[in-house]
Image: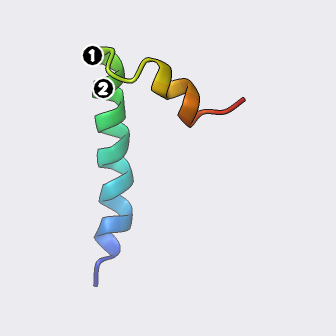
Amino acid sequence: SQLWLYIVAPCLGAAAAGLAERAGVIGAGETVSQPA
């Protein structure tokens, strides 16, 4: 089965988002993905 995808994908996504945020890549895009 591909259950591992549901476990690994969010972790990789969070890690990638963290790295991108550190590098200043997200910027305004972060506010778009987090509507208040």
Q: Write the residue at 27% across / 16% down.
A: 23
Query: What kind of colouring is applied to the model shown?
Result: rainbow
Residue 15, x across and y down, in percent: 31, 37
Q: Quadrant of residue 9?
A: bottom left
Q: Which residue is mark 1?
A: 23
Image x and y of residue 25, in percent: 32, 21
Quadrant, the N terminus? bottom left
Amino acid type, mark 2: Ala
In the image, is 23 to the left or to the right of 33? left
Depth order, front residue of 31/17: 31
Q: Residues within 10 Å of mark 2 (few under 14, many from 20)?
A: few
Closest to the observer: 8 or 16? 16
**Callout 1 amino acid:** Ala
Q: Are marks 2 and 1 in contact (CB under 8 Å)?
A: yes
Residue at point 43%, 17% (across, down): 27
As drawn, the residue found furthest toward the right would be 36
Residue beneath the point at 34% across and 45% down: 13
Residue 6 lies, in percent from the top left, at: 38, 66
Residue 30, image x, y percentages: 49, 27
* Location of residue 25 with respect to 14 vertically, above or below: above
Q: Is residue 1 left or right of residue 26?
A: left
Q: Is residue 16 left or right of residue 34?
A: left
Name the one closer to the observer, 25 or 16: 25
User: How crowded is the residue under tag 1: few (<14 C-alpha within 10 Å), some, or many (20+)?
Assistant: few
Above/below status of 8 relative to 15: below
Q: SS for tag 2?
A: helix
Residue 20 disc label = 2
Where residue 3 is drawn, which disc sits there?
Answer: none
Secondary structure beneath dot 1 equals helix
Cα distance in 3D space between marks 2 and 1: 5 Å
